[in-house]
Image (cartoon, rainbow, N blue to C red):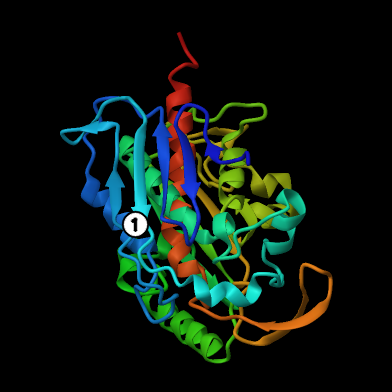
Amino acid sequence: MAGNTFGQLFKLTTFGESHGIAIGGIIDGCPAGLQLDLKAVQRDLDRRKPGQSKIVTQRKESDTVQILSGIFEGVTTGTPIGFQIVNENQKSKDYSHIKDTYRPSHADKVYDDKYGTRDYRGGGRSSARETASRVVAGAVAKQLLAHMKIYAFTTAVGDLEQDKPYQELDFNEIENNAVRCADSAFAKACTQKILEVRKAGDTIGGVITCVIQNVDSGLGEPVFDKLHADLAKAMLSINAVKGFEYGSGFEGSKMLGSEHNDLYNQDGTTQTNLSGGIQGGISNGMDIYFKVAFKPVATIMQDQPTINSKGEQTQMQGKGRHDPCVVPRAVPIVEAMAALVLADHYLRSRTSRV
């Protein structure tokens, strides 16, 4: 099974399944001499872990990271950083009813088609639980890029949309509410919406916005490794993501060039930032900002028609512990993947000049 490694110089390879003994990863390429704050790594994991509020899955996992290699006396050694997170609260029997049944909009059937076998316990490798390993690596990457600030936050749940520009939002508010909005009033409305959907046995999607500040100018590797292209790949690799746009995005297609061009100030900054901090695939030092769209969780607590592995029509209803909306727990995942991309390009930029 290929496709388990992300990055070129700062690399992450993940392993493990949702209901296996453990999940984990290997970070390769992290420079030696980085004083690593493991408490900060754990804090990001705690932001992603299940059971943290009434609007997320109630699976109980401590998600405690165990460092296996690559760190000595709190400092990175330059060798691969191995880590694992033990799965403590598997309830594999919750999935026995889908052993031979394909859940609509899940990876069940395509895994069978591709590999001829699948781990039906919580989706196995296709489970979003794999993203916990990304959060660990992203937390390390953030410390490598300590001068940059990465903020992700919820800006839509279903048809509820945050209409304020990010410059008017309070990033300090993000961790003060369960939905991780940067506006307290909007957070209350989103929470109520998610609770209503959950009560109906259904799920709902949403949008996460990410803002990256204090970005070095010159990150990005044209032609095929443009910074925004790698950010797009990173975000689209996250479970349930259906869309990505940066800067002016699709709205930019409605504008004239005279309206869209970011004019320069004498100090090299720009008067506007419709480019989203990236021009020609290279960061220009302005804020990078983008949006990531998440679909509704595919497992719903309602009867649905489907087929089994024999191609026979059957009925099924979701069981077990699932998020009614993935967006609140996906915020640290978006941050982590952004950090991985930036860390990789930060190291690559060092080789761009003599």
Q: Is residue 60 above or below residue 300?
A: above
Label 1 CA crowd tier, 10 Å (few <14, some 14–19, many 20+): many
Counting from the top left corner in percent of width and height, residue 142 is at: 35, 42
Q: Is residue 68 left or right of residue 109?
A: left
> Could one spot residue 32 in this view of the protein?
yes
Residue extending farthest to the top is: 354
Residue in the picture at 44% in, 78% down: 186
Q: Which quadrant of the rendered structure holds the C terminus?
A: top left
The residue where tag 1 is placed is: 45
Compare residues 75 and 24 and report the one nearer the observer. Answer: 24
Compare residues 316 and 56 and report the one nearer the observer. Answer: 316
Element at label 1: helix
Name the amino acid type tagged 1: Leu
Residue in the picture at 15% in, 33% down: 73
Residue 312, picture quadrant: bottom right
Q: Is residue 57 left or right of residue 301?
A: left
Counting from the top left corner in percent of width and height, residue 197 is at: 55, 86
Counting from the top left corner in percent of width and height, residue 136 is at: 37, 48
> Could one spot residue 210 in this view of the protein?
no
Residue extending farthest to the left is: 73
Q: Is residue 331 above or below residue 41?
A: below
Residue in the picture at 50% in, 70% down: 92
Counting from the top left corner in percent of width and height, residue 272 is at: 53, 47
Compare residues 291 and 202 and report the one nearer the observer. Answer: 202
Residue in the picture at 39% in, 49% down: 150
Compare residues 42 and 236 and report the one nearer the observer. Answer: 42
Total numbered badges shown on the rendered structure? 1
Q: Which quadrant of the rendered structure holds the N terminus?
A: top right
Q: Is residue 243 left or right of residue 198?
A: right
